[in-house]
Structure formats: C-alpha cells, structure tokens
Image (tube, helix red, strand yellow):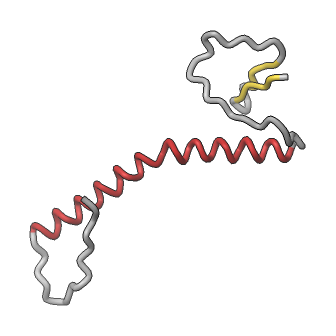
Amino acid sequence: MSYQAKTDWTYDTPVTEDNINRWEQGILDAHLALEKLKPRLAHAETRIKALEDALTNDFRDNRFVITLNTLDGLRVSEGWFDERNGRLVVR
C-alpha cells in the first residue's frame, strides 16, 4: 500500500491512533523501498567507478565489470589482484 499523506491538518485536528499507525507504516514502507534499491545503487556505483577509471587511464575499449562471488574456476594467465584498490587487474 502506498503512503497516503494527510494534508488537511488544522490547529485543532486531533491526532488519532490511526494517524500514528499510518505514519509508522509510511516510514516502514520507505525503509523497505530503500533496502530494495541498495543493490541497484551499489551496482551503479561500481559501473560509474569503472567508467571513471577507464577514462582517466585512457582505456576506451572493452570496459566491463564482473562481480566474482568466488574465485573458484578462475584462471588468469596474466594479471594480479590489487588488494589496495580491491580489484583484479588482467592483462
């Protein structure tokens, strides 16, 4: 259920249990919506960082980002893991 704002408050409008429950539900809904967006935001931040790095390093072709949950089965013939920057550098 989407939040239904009450915009007709007056000085003497009584605050009821239903009003407070509606507020609390709106706050909860907003927090749940933010939690759903966190992975998308993290992915966008990763892509932006990759593009910035590619542009500042004059690396204009073959830009990609892969999220590796594990390194099982990964074989790199040339490259290294850059611990300081938390990235795999492949040549």
Q: Residue at x 25, y 70 (%)?
A: 4
- Answer above or below: position of 66 versus 81: below
Q: Position of residue 75 (x, y in %)?
A: 72, 11
Q: Residue at x 63, y 10 (%)?
A: 73
Quadrant containing the N terminus in the rendered view: bottom left
When asked about the image quadrant of residue 26, the answer is: bottom left
- Answer above or below: position of 55 versus 90: below
When asked about the image quadrant of residue 84, the answer is: top right
Image position of 10 (left or right of 65): left
Q: Position of residue 85 (x, y in %)?
A: 73, 33
Residue at the limit of the structure toward the front, as seen here: 62
- Answer above or below: position of 79 versus 52: above
Q: Position of residue 6 (x, y in %)?
A: 23, 77
Quadrant containing the C terminus in the rendered view: top right
Q: How many marks?
A: 0
- Answer above or below: position of 29 versus 15: above
Q: Position of residue 88 (x, y in %)?
A: 73, 25
Q: Residue at x 35, y 53 (%)?
A: 31
